[in-house]
Amino acid sequence: MTINLKEDERLDDLQVNGYEIIQHPGKFCFGMDAVLLSNFARVKKGENALDLGTGTGIIPILLTAKTEGERFVGLEIQDESVDMARRSVIHNHLGNRVEIVNGDIKEASSIFGAASFDVITTNPPYMIGQHGIANASDMKAIARHEVLCTLDDILRESAKILRPGGRFYMVHRPFRLAEILSKMVQVGIEPKRMRMVHPFIEKEPNMVLIEGKRGGNSRMTVERPLIVYREQGVYSEELLGEYGLK
């Protein structure tokens, strides 16, 4: 299927099911964190999943290929990202499984209603505040810094939207781990599973994958670390497996 790309847009191969995604390299493109989150998240047959801050729709699109979930919704506040995400959904013939909604994470529970999803995924802004941002309306700044929403907003709304026993999946930075875990518990999402991601085996982790359960018991499993590179420029065998390239 041919698709009309706008100026400076490109079509990237997602290496699964023949899917492709529209991106704008001058604004913001998805990274490895989104791909790893889509592998870490579990969406069972018949379940409905919501991706908060979906950007150009990468996580819902990947989850249709990697899980047996029934319905996937992406919530995104930036109009330009919403437009790209919706066109990618159409391009991949996923309109019967994926919906992109234009809206604010801070109002998510009002948009979708309480206890309306089995699973929530999110790859939120990692950096606190707006320090060092030249333009707070820039798409890259919004994706990386807590300009339009905070960790508190995401956890508060997720706790409302998840059904009892529903699962929450997030990728974030380890330097905020203590804050993340304590705030999850405060809103009633119990941390259940965690995995650290290291760029090299001798380096500190630079990502953390977390699963929580609404109303779960207090017990968490820490999985073995994922090492991204075997050596400079060479992905590890495990990482290639995560990407589905083996």
Image: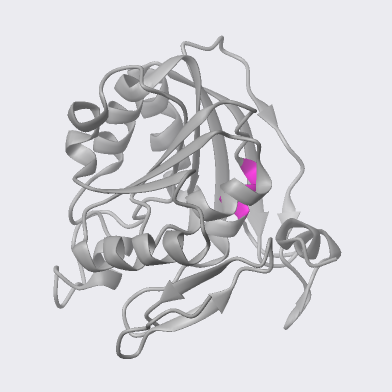
Q: Is residue 129 above or below residue 178?
A: below
Q: Residue at x 82, y 59 (%)?
A: 238
Answer yes or no: is residue 206 visible. no
**Residue at 47% over, 44% down:** 96
Would residue 221 be counted in the magenta stretch? no
Name the side, left or right, on which 71 lies relative to 222. Answer: left
Q: Residue at x 53, y 63 (%)?
A: 92
Q: Is residue 88 above or below residue 109?
A: below
Position of residue 43 measured from the top left corner of the image (x, y, whole percent): 60, 33
Quadrant in the picture for residue 224: top right
* First to last magenta residue range: 36-40
Who's the residue at 45% across and 30% down the image?
Answer: 181
Measured as percent of width and height from the top left, residue 246 is found at 85, 66
> Does the magenta stretch mainly form a helix, a strand or a loop?
helix
Please state if 71 lies on the left or on the right of 134 as rendered: right
Residue 5 % position (x, y)? 37, 83
Q: Position of residue 147 (x, y in %)?
A: 19, 56
228 and 101: which is toward the camera: 101
